[in-house]
Amino acid sequence: MNRFLNFRLLVAFVCMVALAGCSTLASLASYSVTNADLQRVVDRQVANVQEQGSILGIPLLLEVDDMQVNIGPENRQTIQLIADATATVSVLGMKYPAKVKLDVEGMPYYDPSKKAVFIRSLVLNDTTVDAMGYRGNLAPVSSKVMSLLNHFLMEQPVYEVKDVPATYAWLTDMPLVMTVESGKIVFKPQSGE
């Protein structure tokens, strides 16, 4: 009887270890990038987003000061970016800054050859320009900032899979499927189906 009880305890222990192992493997079968993870990457890149241009022949310097990230807003398959920018116009040696706020959304795209996530197909949700007492929308300035963001996001990834923690390093060596959920991007191995 005592041997039978010991055997049952051993079987129960082995089953518990197997279940714990399965749950650990299941959690390693995917990797998530959160809003906070993406925000850290964007914060490092935002200092590089600037462009010289002109509007109606007037010199203009565009600089993105800050950008907020929201993955999967309202469960949509998009990434929302809210950019605070400064558009500085130079006229007769004087500089006139205008604050521009753009709310844009785009489709995240995983490029397997670069192992990176880019944002494509930006759509403008809202824009506000605040310049010397004027507050509203100035289409030429907004379109210039939108063009700057679009160009930047086409060339600069918002996340690279090589940045995963060591526990998930195996992800860098296999084809992946990317999905967008509210507040996170999830990477899973591509199935052979």
Image: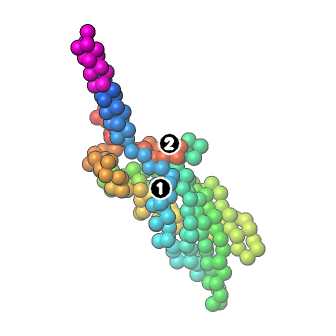
Q: Determine which residue is flagged by label 2.
A: 181
Q: Position of residue 98 (x, y in %)?
A: 66, 74
Q: Position of residue 49 (x, y in %)?
A: 50, 70
Query: Quadrant location of the N terminus?
Result: top left
Specify the farthest residue to the bottom: 93
Q: Position of residue 69 (x, y in %)?
A: 54, 56
Q: CA distance from mark 2 to mark 1?
A: 14 Å
Mark linked to residue 123 = none
Which residue is located at x 45 percent, y 46 percent?
185
Whether residue 143 is visible, yes or no, is no
Q: Position of residue 43 (x, y in %)?
A: 50, 64
Residue toward you, 13 or 119: 13
Residue stretch in magenta: 1-14
Mark linked to residue 38 = 1
Decide whether the magenta segment is chiefly helix, strand or loop: helix
Specify the farthest residue to the right: 133
Relative height, residue 159 to residue 56 (above, below): above
Which residue is located at x 43 percent, y 46 percent?
32
